[in-house]
């Protein structure tokens, strides 16, 4: 039996994850629907005054993006753990670091990227000034990638547990906080007319760090969960 | 050097040596705390601006310093347990979490009590305070993860990974007062350059910090000894220990 090269293997893994996601379009739609619904809660709770909403919009949009990412992170490895294919992956001669990266990348493509793409619509609904929308898009684009990478760690550590859902939020929300701070700060800066680039640069730095280190932790977490 | 390292991995040896250390360290810690508290609370001059309310510094600062240091101890123990698969490192890491969480909580509460008379508010969402709150969540996350696993060996490994990931936040907490403009004052005690605290206030503070470190060590060792006995309860040396005690 000939084994595929590493690049090919990861490309196939990524494709497999995307095909799986595409076969269940509801799973792709749910986080977006969740995003829309929670955004709709804020005008009801805070009152529909456009000025108030515009003030809170950067924070609201970022927190809701973070929550919908959190809810989907839980399932990244779940089905593959349940049917044993994760165990096969750990036994395969391919570097786990890159396989994990393929999983996380697929997760980001179907949640973070889509969220970033639809976010301008919700930004307009919350009356976010137009100057902030570009910053919102790019900060979500970079930030949700960090969130997916960090969420992967939490998912890997809790995949073997029966009641992982609540626990994963306790584990990774503290790690999400720095992303939230700089993500919403980028949007606020853009709204107030100062450059958002420094904040985006910090998000980019976080992303580089997360790409380099998070898959290692995720891989270690998967090994622990499968061993347990 | 390596024999020492290997000895650390042996529960009976560590149990014995920690007993000896505790016999001396516990009284020393208590004396240090008693002297530090009396010195700080009764014999130092009141602050020029804050009057007597500043005296909470003798609890607040040591608790905060050791809470942060405790995280490093936990993460280092976690790294050791992952790399060398030492059981004792697992136990040390697990023992660190509740102590660190308690100290972080003390730092936050004393900070709130101090903030009321000086800043006029119990709580502000300021960089240092928020990041200390994150530290508390990190500790609680480790405890929650450990409790969630039925298999305690896997639990320890998972916690080790989590605590290592969490170390990313620690330098941010240390530096938060310097990086962001914040209500919390920057560090007064500096290793390089002039400290911005008067010597008469500094010495009792240093004594308290050292005592808190000692307190942390005592609590850590006691916690570890309990855990060691619980895990090794079926082994010969624990049984012998129990028989000796009973006699």
Image (cartoon, coloured by chain):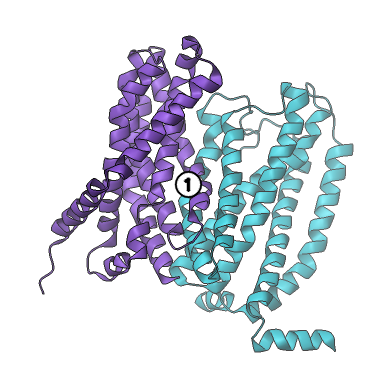
Q: Residues within 10 Å of mark 1 (few under 14, many from 20)?
A: many
Residue identified by numbered label 1: A172
At horizontal 55% and vertical 69% (from top left) the residue drawn is B152
* Residue B137 sits above or below residue B231 on the image: above
Picture coordinates of residue B33 (x, y %)? 81, 51
At horizontal 78% and vertical 30% (from top left) the residue drawn is B54
Q: Secondary structure at mark 1?
A: helix
Tag count: 1
Colour of chain B as rendered: cyan
Chain drawn in purple: A
Picture coordinates of residue B74 (x, y %)? 57, 57
Q: Is residue B119 left or right of residue A161?
A: right
Quadrant in which the C terminus of chain B is drawn: bottom right
* Residue B44 sits above or below residue A216 on the image: above
The residue closer to the viewer here, A105 or B79, is A105
Picture coordinates of residue B237 (x, y %)? 68, 86
The residue closer to the viewer here, B149 or B92, is B149
Q: In the rendered image, which quarter is residue A198 located in?
A: top left
Q: Is residue A228 left or right of residue B5?
A: left
At horizontal 73% and vertical 62% (from top left) the residue drawn is B218
Residue B205 visible in image: yes
Q: Residue furthest right?
A: B42
At horizontal 42% and vertical 27% (from top left) the residue drawn is A61
């Amino acid at each position: 039996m000939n084994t595929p090269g590493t690049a090919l293997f990861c490309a196939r893994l990524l494709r497999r994850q995307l095909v799986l996601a595409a076969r269940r379009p509801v799973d792709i739609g749910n986080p977006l629907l969740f995003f829309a619904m929670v955004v709709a809660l804020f005008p009801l709770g805070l009152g529909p005054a456009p000025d108030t909403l515009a003030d809170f919009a950067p924070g609201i949009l970022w927190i809701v993006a973070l929550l919908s990412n959190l809810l989907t992170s839980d399932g990244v490895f779940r089905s593959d753990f349940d049917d044993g294919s994760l165990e096969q992956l750990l036994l395969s001669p391919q570097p786990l670091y890159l396989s994990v990266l393929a999983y996380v990348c697929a997760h980001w493509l179907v949640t973070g990227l889509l969220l970033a793409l639809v976010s301008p619509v919700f930004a307009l609904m919350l009356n976010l000034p137009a100057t902030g929308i570009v910053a919102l898009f790019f900060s979500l684009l970079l930030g949700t990638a960090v969130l997916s990478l960090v969420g992967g760690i939490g998912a890997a550590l809790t995949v073997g547990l029966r009641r992982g859902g609540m626990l994963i939020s306790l584990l990774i929300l503290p790690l999400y906080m720095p992303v939230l701070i700089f993500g919403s700060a980028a949007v606020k800066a853009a709204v107030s007319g100062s450059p958002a680039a420094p904040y985006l640069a910090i998000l980019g730095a976080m992303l580089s760090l997360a790409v380099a280190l998070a898959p290692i932790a995720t891989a270690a977490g998967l090994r622990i969960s499968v061993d347990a | 050097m390596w024999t020492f390292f290997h000895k650390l991995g042996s529960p009976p040896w560590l149990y014995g040596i920690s007993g000896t250390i505790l016999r001396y360290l516990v009284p020393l810690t208590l004396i240090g705390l008693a002297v530090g508290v009396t010195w700080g609370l009764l014999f130092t001059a009141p602050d020029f601006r804050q009057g007597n309310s500043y005296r909470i510094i003798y609890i607040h600062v040591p608790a905060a310093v050791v809470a942060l240091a405790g995280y490093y101890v936990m993460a280092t123990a976690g790294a050791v347990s992952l790399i060398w698969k030492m059981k004792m490192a697992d136990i040390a890491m697990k023992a660190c979490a509740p102590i660190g969480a308690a100290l972080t909580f003390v730092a936050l509460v004393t900070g709130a009590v101090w903030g009321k008379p000086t800043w006029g508010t119990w709580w502000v969402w300021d960089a240092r305070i928020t990041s200390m709150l994150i530290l508390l969540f990190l500790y609680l996350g480790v405890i929650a993860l450990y409790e969630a696993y039925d298999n305690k060996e896997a639990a320890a490994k998972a916690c080790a990974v989590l605590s290592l990931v969490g170390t990313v936040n620690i330098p941010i907490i240390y530096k938060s007062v310097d990086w962001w403009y914040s209500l919390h004052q920057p560090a007064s005690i500096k290793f390089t350059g002039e400290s911005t605290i008067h010597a008469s206030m500094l010495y009792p503070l240093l004594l308290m910090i050292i005592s808190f470190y000692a307190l942390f060590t005592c609590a850590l060792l006691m916690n570890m000894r309990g855990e060691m006995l619980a895990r090794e309860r079926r082994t010969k040396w624990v049984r012998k220990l129990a028989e000796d005690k009973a006699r």
